[in-house]
Image (cartoon, grey):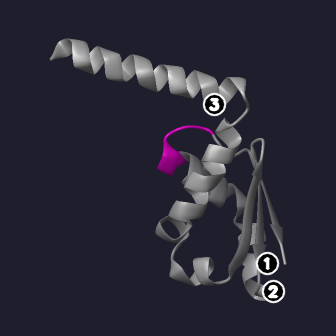
Amino acid sequence: MRGDKDKDIRIGSVIEAMYKRYRLDAKVNELKIKKDWEDIFGRLIANHTNQIELKGKTLYVTVTNGPLRNELFLQRDLMIAKLNEYYEQVIIEKVFIQS
C-alpha cells in the first residue's frame, strides 16, 4: 500500500512540475478561480461578474455593476487575501477591477 501512496505523490509532483515548465500553472489557477468564484465571494458578486482572467499573478475581474465595481476596488487587498487563503498558496498578488 505504501508504494501506491508514494507513486501518487511522485505523479502529482511530476504534473505540477510540467505545469510550471510549460507555464500552464496560471491557466490552471484561472480555471480553479472561475469554478470556485461563487463559493469564495458569494452569489451576488458572481452574478455581476462577467469575466475573470489571470495573467501571471494578476487577476482581472470585469463586473456589470458600477457601485459593486467601486466596492470591490476598495476591497482588493481583502480579495487577494481571501483567494490566497482559499487555495492555501499565493496565486494572486494584484487585482484589477473593470466594468
Q: How crowded is mark 1: few (under 14 residues within 10 Å), some or many (20 or more)?
A: few
Image quadrant containing the N terminus: top left
- How far from the left and from the top, in percent, is residue 17? 59, 22
Q: Distance between the residues labelled 1 and 3?
A: 35 Å
Camera-side residue of 46 and 10: 10
Mark 1 to mark 2: distance in Å?
A: 6 Å
Mark 1 and mark 2 residues within 8 Å of each other at the beta carbon: yes
The residue singled out by tag 1 in the image is 70
Quadrant location of residue 51? bottom right
Residue 64, placed above or below residue 55: below
Quarter of the image for the C terminus: give it: bottom right
* Element at label 3: helix
Q: Nearer the viewer, mark 1 or mark 2?
A: 2
Residue 86, magenta (yes or no): yes
Q: In this view, does 59 lie above or below 71?
A: above
Q: Nearer the viewer, mark 2 or mark 3?
A: 3
Q: Mark 2 points at which residue?
A: 66
Find numbered disc 1 in the image and state the secondary structure of the residue it sits on: helix
Q: What residue type is labelled 2?
A: Gly
Magenta segment boundaries in residue numbering: 85-90
| Whether label 2 touches label 3, CB < 8 Å | no
Residue 46 position (above or below residue 17): below
Which residue is tagged 3?
19
Pointer 2 local density, CA inside 10 Å: few below 14, some 14–19, many at least 20: few
**Residue found at x 61% / y 78%:** 45
Label whose residue precedes the other's in the sequence (1 or 3): 3
Which numbered mark, 1 or 3, is in the foreground of this view?
3
